[in-house]
Image (spheres, grey):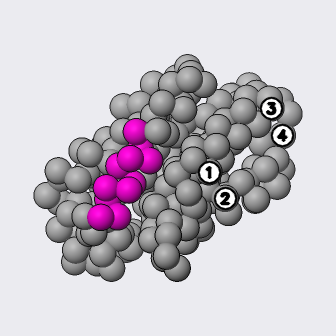
Amino acid sequence: MSRDLRVCFVGDSYVAGVGDPRCLGWAGRLAAAAHAEGVPLTAYNLGVRRQTSADIMDRWLIECSPRLPEGVDARVVLSFGVNDAMYENGGQRVAPADSVANLGNLLARAAERGWRVLVVAPPPVADAEHNARTAALDERFAQTCAASDVPYVRVHQPLYDNAVWAAEVRAGDGAHPGAAGYDEITALIAPRWREWLSG
């Protein structure tokens, strides 16, 4: 009997693949690559535009539970933070300490259910001040994941220095890339993703 591997990709617009004319984003590309490499899986894209870690906390368990029933190889990929670091109405949408606490809570609740987790860092946008706030969050997310022994994929700085990503984001809406940009972030995630799937 084949392995019943199921992966919920939970997060924001980058998880949903906003801006990608192929409608795959990095989550779809990773799932397609897994199939091509002989690792069939059922992938659920649960990305929602503009959502923060607080929004995701409110919905993720309700959405993941029916998709990850007992007896399957249940996995969750989390990615958020750009919207947390967005500055509006006189402050960040989510305070950094609250973002970190939300991530820690998500990891703990997934562990209680035996769901293996991979976390992908929030990527950069075409705004230096916003990126500085996101980069600070990225560091704290990395520490939180390390403390929970959860793999964390550091994409923020590599993409900040990536000419393709930067050009695509500028050509788009200032936040989301097109197909070539999603190819770049997928290439950064893929090695850790393969390692995580095989474990």
Mark whose residue sits in front, 4 or 3: 3
As for residue 130 lying within the magenta part, the answer is yes
Pointers 4 and 3 in contact (CB under 8 A)? no
Report the amino acid beneath label 2.
Ala
> In front here: 166 or 127?
127
Question: How many numbered marks appear?
Answer: 4
Pointer 1 residue: 98
The dot on residue 113 is 3
Q: Distance between the residues labelled 4 and 3?
A: 10 Å
Pointer 4 residue: 69
Report the amino acid beneath label 1.
Asp
Residue neighbourhood size for the residue with mark 2, other residues' Cα within 10 Å, grouped as few (<14), some (14–19), many (≥20): some
Pointers 2 and 1 in contact (CB under 8 A)? yes
> In front here: 175 or 115?
175
Mark whose residue sits in front, 2 or 4: 2
- Residue at screen point 64% across, 37% down: 104
Any part of residue 13 in sight? no
**Of helix, strand and loop, which mostly describes the magenta segment?**
helix
User: Which comes before the other along the chain, label 1 or label 4?
Assistant: 4
Pointer 2 residue: 54
Which part of the image, by quadrant, shows the N terminus? top right
Q: How far apart are marks 3 and 2 (CA)?
A: 20 Å
